[in-house]
Image (cartoon, rainbow, N blue to C red):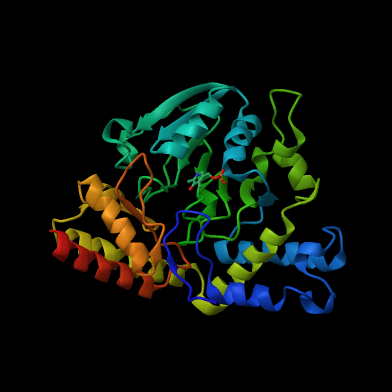
Amino acid sequence: MTERIFNFSAGPSMLPVPVLERAAAEMLNYKGSGMSVMEMSHRSKVYDSIIKSTEASLRRVMGIPDNYKVLFLQGGATMQFSAIPLNLMRTGKADYALTGHFAKNAYKEAKKFGEIHVAASSEADNFSYIPSQAELDLTPDADYFYHCANNTIFGTEWKYCPETGAVPVVADMSSNILSKPVDVSQYGVIMAGAQKNMGPAGLTVVIVRDDLLGFYPQDKMPVLLDWKLMADKESMYNTPPTYAIYILGLVLEWIENEVGGLEEMQKRNEKKAKLLYDYLDSQSFYHPAARPDSRSMMNVTFRTGDADLDAKFVQGSIENGMTNLKGHRLVGGMRASIYNAMPYAGVEKLVDFMQKFAKENG
Ligand SMILES: *Cc1c(COP(=O)(O)O)cnc(C)c1O
């Protein structure tokens, strides 16, 4: 086996090595069951304990209040772009903040189902910043306010939970869930695809306040988009993504027992991000893409300003044991995704390489 590489992928992305080792050790025979978790009936006793304990861990780690349901679904964050308006629209009005590609995709989908008001947009500045509370143009009687908590492609992150009065706040936390503590009670709905910070692709977590369930303006709700049904069936209306849920359970154990919870996780993440941003601010060869007050702790975007040099950088990084540093085509340049599982040593190695590359090419 070759050595593991520092994988800066935006998603699917790195998982903690102890999690992979544990999954490997339990691959053929999970706790005396004589089978892999992949091979188990989702209705079996042994699997029931896996899904129940994963939910209990998520509730402990995130401090999810009892009046919130936790749903383990499929279809990615993208399926929730459809489920959100379908489940939350009562009067048919919602506010959306457009701060990136995925926020815009969510907005486009919601427009099929209701009257959507753009509460703020940073598109004119290529989504390089997050609007302030004062910049939000809110509808007082909207059914919900939608925002994307971390903009994976552009490298910006909301540093606050918007204040919207009685209007429930909906957040796509696909790329920053579990990176820091959040006060779940400030949100009506939190949703996240697993493949950035929680586990493998195939699992989507929805955390929803229970008083928001069960209001549909239409009688033709597709069953798999129906949060109320999924809550009543404990995410088992049909087969849930069994193996991905198991891996999430291991990731949560790692956060709880090895990292020491989300406050510690945040400290680690801040330390990594600071190393990279401090370096970016100390030089002039690379140009950070996001406005300083809006920078993401998870996805760091930068460019040299010369597409050929950017390509040379990406090629050179691969030769130096790092991969997936090419930026998304909508931003260009480079993007380093430094999720929970990226070790500090990976960011050190990246900064070393950046210094060397700047010296040779500046
Ligand atoms: C990756 C990502 C998505 C898309 O997720 P899928 O699981 O591919 O549907 C949506 N929102 C954010 C913030 C993401 O990072």
Q: Is residue 225 above or below residue 321?
A: above
Q: Is residue 68 above or below residue 137?
A: below
Horizontal side of residue 234 vs 276, given as left or right: right
Horizontal side of residue 175 vs 322, given as left or right: right
Task: Examine the image and state in which quarter residue 61 appears.
Answer: bottom right
Task: Examine the image and state in which quarter residue 360 appears.
Answer: bottom left
Residue 142 in view, yes or no: no
Number of numbered labels in the structure image = 0
x then y, percent, for residue 233 = 80, 48
Which residue is located at x 45 percent, y 42 percent? 148
Please tell me which residue lies in front, 53 or 6: 6
Which residue is located at x 77 percent, y 41 percent? 229
Please tell me which residue lies in front, 201 or 227: 201
x then y, percent, for residue 249 = 65, 66
Task: Examine the image and state in which quarter residue 47 appears.
Answer: bottom right
The quadrant of the image that shows the N terminus is bottom right
Horizontal side of residue 44 vs 138, given as left or right: right
Q: Is residue 88 above or below residue 37?
A: above
Which residue is located at x 74 percent, y 46 percent? 231
Please tell me which residue lies in front, 308 or 293: 308
The quadrant of the image that shows the C terminus is bottom left
Residue 83 in view, yes or no: yes
Horizontal side of residue 226 vs 186, given as left or right: right
Which residue is located at x 57 percent, y 44 percent? 77
x then y, percent, for residue 327 = 35, 49
